[in-house]
Image (cartoon, rainbow, N blue to C red):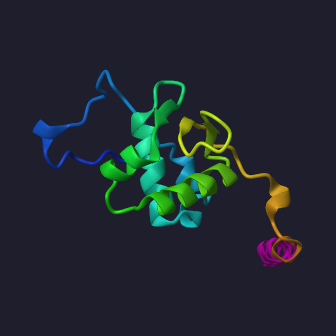
Amino acid sequence: MPLKKPLPLLVPQRTRTVPRSFAWIDHRLRSEGILPQLRPEDLGLYLFLVMAADQRGLSCWRLDRVEKTLPCFDRHMLWDARSRLAELDLIAYRPWHHGDPDGCYQVLSVQRPPQDRLSPELHAAVSKVLRQLEVSSVQP
């Protein structure tokens, strides 16, 4: 989030610069409320795929190689994380062949969640709070 007043650098001789080989994590993962939905293995695999991807978000990795790079997660955890990231529409995955555990990944652009994803109960509760705020701001 941009700051109103610039902060002084803590270690000026170590200021980050954008290298030729560059990856980014979209801040909307946090601001759109996606980050709290992710488990540690989801975050680990997502970070790995972001760093491994080309400029269009594409990469090809075997799960056993990912497991060697991220030894804190076993292959089954990574398999589940891959499914979860795809369900959350953060990555696309296509196996090399039907049933093959390995294939090609694409890190997708982060989309704003549609409003209809709110449960009816949550929508009603939010509407009630907004109405109460409107009433209290109008009263002297």
Q: Is residue 138 magenta?
A: yes
- For the residue pair 88 and 119, the one nearer the viewer reads as 88
Residue 90, image x and y in percent? 61, 46
**Quadrant (top left/top right/bottom left/bottom right) for the C terminus:** bottom right
Identified at 56% across, 46% down, the residue is: 101
Q: Position of residue 89 (x, y in %)?
A: 67, 47
Q: Is residue 3 visible?
A: no
Q: Is residue 43 left or right of residue 21?
A: right
Residue 74 seen anywhere in this rendered image of the structure = yes
Q: Which residues are magenta?
A: 124-140
On the image, the x and y values in percent for residue 52 come to: 41, 35
Residue 139, compared with residue 83, is above or below; it is below
Which residue sits at x=31%, y=58%? 71
Q: Nearer the viewer, residue 89 or 71?
A: 71
**In the visual, does 74 lie left or right of 131?**
left
Residue nearest the observer in this picture, 69 or 131: 69
Main secondary structure found in the magenta portion: helix
